[in-house]
Amino acid sequence: MKKLEKSKLIGNKTIQISGSKSISNRLLILESLFNNIKIGNLSNSQDTQLLKKALGENTETVDIHHAGTAMRFLTSYYSIQEGKTTILTGSKRMKERPIKNLVNALQDLGVEIEYLQNEGFPPLKITGRKITETQVNVPANISSQFITSLLLIAGKLENGLQINLVGEVTSRSYIEMTLDILAKFGIQASFAGNTIKVEPFNENNQLSTVNYEVESDWSSASYFYSIAALGREIIHLKSFYKESTQGDSAITKIYEQFFGIKTTFVEDEHQLTLQPVENFQFPEKIVLDMNNCPDIAQTLCVTAAALKIPFEISGLGTLRVKETDRLLALYNELKKLGTETEITDLTIKSTRFSEPQENISIATYQDHRMAMSFAPFCLIKELNIEEEDVVEKSYPMFWEDLKIILSKN
């Protein structure tokens, strides 16, 4: 358990955040498939290290523990390893996270995949084969990682792949980020309407080795936006790009609009500064669709709860099937901060504010984002964070970095 005493923010400190987990995991799959990538500033997250380890092993059974991204990306990756049979498994929670839509798509492409325990869930037995089919239909409102999983292998298929998205697209920015990465390595793709088409990679036009410096993780940056919003002091973050392809870079506009945190970039140093606006007038209510950046919803809800700003957040359907049911977790834990909410399958809405509980202890439900999104509340009141080690999944240095910018009040 991590005890966080009531703290104040020390201004003008600089934090170097590790490379984006989302970008790093995509690059590791492409590196293994195409062998023309050298990766710099690779994420030090547990998820990325588990994926890297799995790709370096030559075993029949691969256990990726809690790493959901690895489960999804490797399902497609092992599907095209011709003649190789792989059993892909994970933790107890991983075996409760649905993967049926991705498996259905791969089966439609002719891949042999079996469920070894419960229909629609890991563990999986995957028999790799050569895919020659050219089109597949996929529900558009599923996790963007399912779609990205298919996109990462598409350039390796001899006929490429057309993905027809059926319905309204969820987390479009993550799909676009994947396509941007593919383009950097000479894999041609288009995204028009609800159709994504990836051309087969021409091995004769093999690019020379590409050096890719991974931008730092915007999801991790979000916790410092929350701290700046509550502590009202300047924070500097490295290494970030103004024209980022990460969907969670939406945090810059969201926190400027609702919390008065202005972002300025020093582009040649890849550094940004979080500058609180003096005498900022907080809104009477926050109404926001976070369909394109659901991973920062927990951070925003805690910031709004700490400032007692009513909020109504929509577009959160994917949060039900993350490391935990994040909407239910928010409903439970925000009560401890004095914030009552109503939740549906897609939304969370504050209904009443009262004084925080005494002796607050935040349950994390083995979810790294629950731990880190609630941590900034220590600027309001001391609290404990249970299962403090869960941060290793995405941001192992989080507690150490927090020490740099916080002091006892």
Image (cartoon, rainbow, N blue to C red):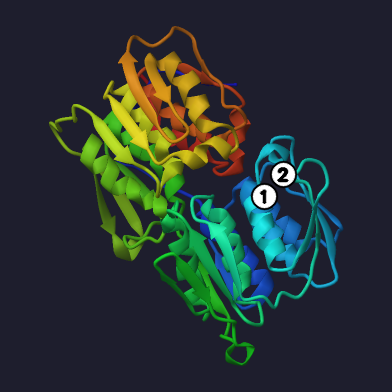
Query: From what the image shows, is residue 73 above or below residue 9?
Result: below
Q: How many marks?
A: 2
Q: Residue at x 47, y 26 (%)?
A: 330
Left/right placement of residue 132 relative to residue 15 reads right
Q: Where is residue 400 in the image (x, y as percent from the top left)?
A: 51, 36
Q: Which residue is drawn at 56% across and 59% down?
A: 138
Residue beneath disc 2: 121
Left/right placement of residue 74 relative to residue 213 reads right
> Is label 2 in a helix, a strand or a loop?
loop
Toward which corner of the image does residue 364 lie, by quadrant? top right
Query: From what the image shows, is residue 74 above or below residue 209?
Result: above
Q: Which residue is drawn at 40% across and 46% down?
A: 291
Residue beneath disc 1: 100
* Nearer to the camera, 135 or 268: 135
Q: What residue type is labelled 1?
A: Lys
* Nearer to the camera, 386 or 182: 182
Residue 37 in sight in this render: yes
Q: Position of residue 207 (x, y in %)?
A: 56, 85
Q: What residue type is labelled 2?
A: Phe
Instruction: Specify which label sits upstream in the sequence, 2 or 1.
Output: 1
Q: Do the residues labelled 2 and 1 touch (CB within 8 Å)?
A: yes
Query: From what the image shows, is residue 107 above or below residue 135?
Result: above
What separation in Å lies between label 2 and label 1 (alpha carbons)? Answer: 7 Å
Toward which corner of the image does residue 406 lie, by quadrant? top left
Q: Which residue is drawn at 19% across and 30% down?
A: 283
* Nearer to the camera, 245 or 407: 245
